[in-house]
Image (cartoon, rainbow, N blue to C red):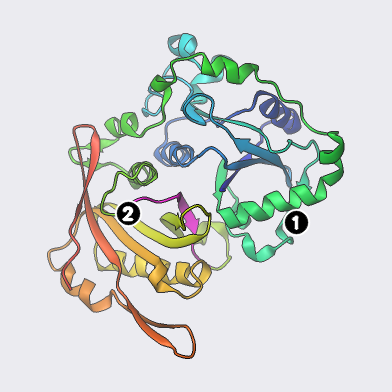
């Protein structure tokens, strides 16, 4: 399964904060305001969460684990109060009676939450970042770029390595059930007592506060919506995907602020496994996408082919989702959207790839709609 790492900071004792989260089995991100990128990016991360995914905490160079997202009621993640996905400011008094978890006067800043348990336990002692990153180092991609964000999502492979080192280093604690954080079900029981259908996390309230006509005002809002729609198989042209993430590193390691990131990366698994058999690379533009956008997504396709698909372009699908395209985009598309490669040995199989779709989005009557406008070959 996938994994999530939550950064714990602040002026207080971070270990106490981790202990409190582990005891309650609840984590909620503190959002200072409604600035588009942190608001919509964090919302997108929550919408990708699934029961069974692992969670970890990070503070002062050390990682703490292991947790597992579990459903309390129908899901493992919720709005902490109704309509919390709208980019509007609210007061504590106006939501106090509707809160799933009351964080006091600061509750309006805790908009979304997820529920978890120890898996098998949340260990009191963390593991240093250097020790983790030198264990199966080739599997760690996102963890190396954990910087200036409240939390990140790890792929199945990366999560497996992180979970593995915890289980190896904490064998004695697991066997003796010592030096582990206690867990209580009171908060989960209190959450389950609500009518949880009113607390489902969707992008619809957000869209109503960040659209003009048929378009979104900023790309992160489009990104959050596409993430939700892929998780729920709402983009019929692209089908069903088992793993969905966004802002995924797509360049050799360098200063974090200069690293390229794929807007959306999704994976489809072989039936009844977590073995990826297809990858989706999506580049999003809130307004017009042109030839430069095609060049950009093709660069990401090459990266995913090298880093994830082991040279097999056939395993990759790509798409651009934008509000509009130039009238002559078809000519450039036919010129550059092609890759030639070989697979196998004795005999070698010569292959050609050109699986890039162009989709046009439009917002209407509360939902996002998509139309395939891929030029003919």
**Depicted 253 relative to depicted 366: above or below:** below
Rendering coords of residue 276 (x, y %): 49, 60
Rendering coords of residue 148 (x, y %): 57, 46
**Depicted 274 relative to depicted 375: above or below:** above
Q: Residue at x 56, y 48 (%)?
A: 2
Give the magenta range: 239-251
The residue where tag 2 is placed is 284
Counting residues from the N terminus, which is met first, the one under dot 2 or under dot 1?
A: 1
Q: Dividing the picture into quarters, in which one does residue 106 lie?
A: top right
Q: Which residue is drawn at 52% across and 25% down?
A: 110
Tell me, yes or no, whether the highlighted magenta stretch contains residue 249.
yes
Describe residue 289's horizontal placement relative to residue 100 as left or right: left
Rendering coords of residue 195 (x, y %): 43, 16
Of residues 2 and 99, the one drawn nearer to the viewer in this rendering: 2
Of residues 171 and 9, the one drawn nearer to the viewer in this rendering: 171
Of residues 110 and 123, the one drawn nearer to the viewer in this rendering: 123
Q: Residue at x 28, y 74 (%)?
A: 337
Task: Give how far apart the Cα atoms at labels 2 and 1 are.
Answer: 35 Å
Q: Dividing the picture into quarters, in which one does residue 16 lie?
A: top right
Secondary structure beneath dot 2 equals: strand
Residue 260 seen in render: no
Rendering coords of residue 83 (x, y %): 38, 23
Of residues 93 and 72, the one drawn nearer to the viewer in this rendering: 72
Q: Residue furthest bottom?
A: 346
The residue where tag 1 is placed is 130
């Amino acid at each position: 399964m996938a994994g999530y790492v939550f950064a714990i900071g602040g002026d207080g004792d971070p270990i106490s904060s981790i202990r409190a989260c582990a005891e309650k089995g609840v984590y909620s991100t503190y959002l200072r305001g409604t600035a588009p990128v942190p608001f919509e990016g964090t919302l997108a991360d929550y919408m990708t969460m699934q029961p069974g995914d692992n969670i970890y905490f990070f503070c002062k160079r050390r990682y703490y684990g292991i947790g597992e997202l579990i459903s309390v009621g129908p899901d493992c993640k919720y709005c902490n109060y109704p309509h919390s996905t709208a980019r509007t400011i609210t007061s504590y008094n106006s939501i106090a009676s509707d809160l799933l978890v009351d964080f006091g006067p600061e509750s309006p800043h805790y908009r979304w939450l997820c529920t978890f348990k120890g898996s098998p336990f949340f260990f009191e002692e963390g593991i240093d970042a250097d020790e983790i990153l030198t264990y199966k180092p080739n599997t760690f991609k996102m963890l190396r770029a954990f910087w200036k964000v409240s939390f990140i999502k790890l792929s199945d492979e990366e999560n497996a390595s992180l979970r593995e080192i915890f289980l190896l280093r904490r064998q004695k604690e697991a066997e003796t059930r010592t030096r582990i954080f206690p867990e209580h079900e009171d908060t989960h029981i209190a959450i389950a007592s609500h009518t949880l259908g009113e607390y489902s996390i969707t992008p619809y309230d957000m869209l109503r506060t960040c659209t003009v006509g048929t378009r979104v005002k900023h790309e992160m809002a489009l990104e959050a919506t596409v993430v939700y729609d892929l998780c729920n198989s709402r983009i019929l042209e692209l089908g069903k995907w088992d793993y969905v993430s966004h802002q995924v590193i797509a360049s050799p390691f360098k200063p974090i602020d200069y690293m390229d990131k794929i807007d959306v990366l999704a994976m489809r698994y072989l039936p009844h496994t977590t073995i990826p058999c297809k990858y989706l690379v999506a580049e999003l533009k809130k307004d017009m996408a042109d030839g430069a956008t095609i060049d950009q997504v093709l660069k990401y396709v090459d990266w995913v082919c090298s880093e994830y698909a082991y040279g097999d372009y056939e395993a990759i699908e790509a798409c651009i989702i934008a509000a509009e395209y130039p009238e002559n985009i078809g000519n450039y598309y036919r010129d550059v959207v092609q890759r030639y490669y070989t697979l196998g040995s004795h005999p070698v199989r010569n292959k050609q790839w050109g699986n890039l779709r162009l989709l046009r989005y439009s917002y209407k009557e509360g939902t996002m709609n998509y139309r395939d406008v891929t030029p003919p070959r």
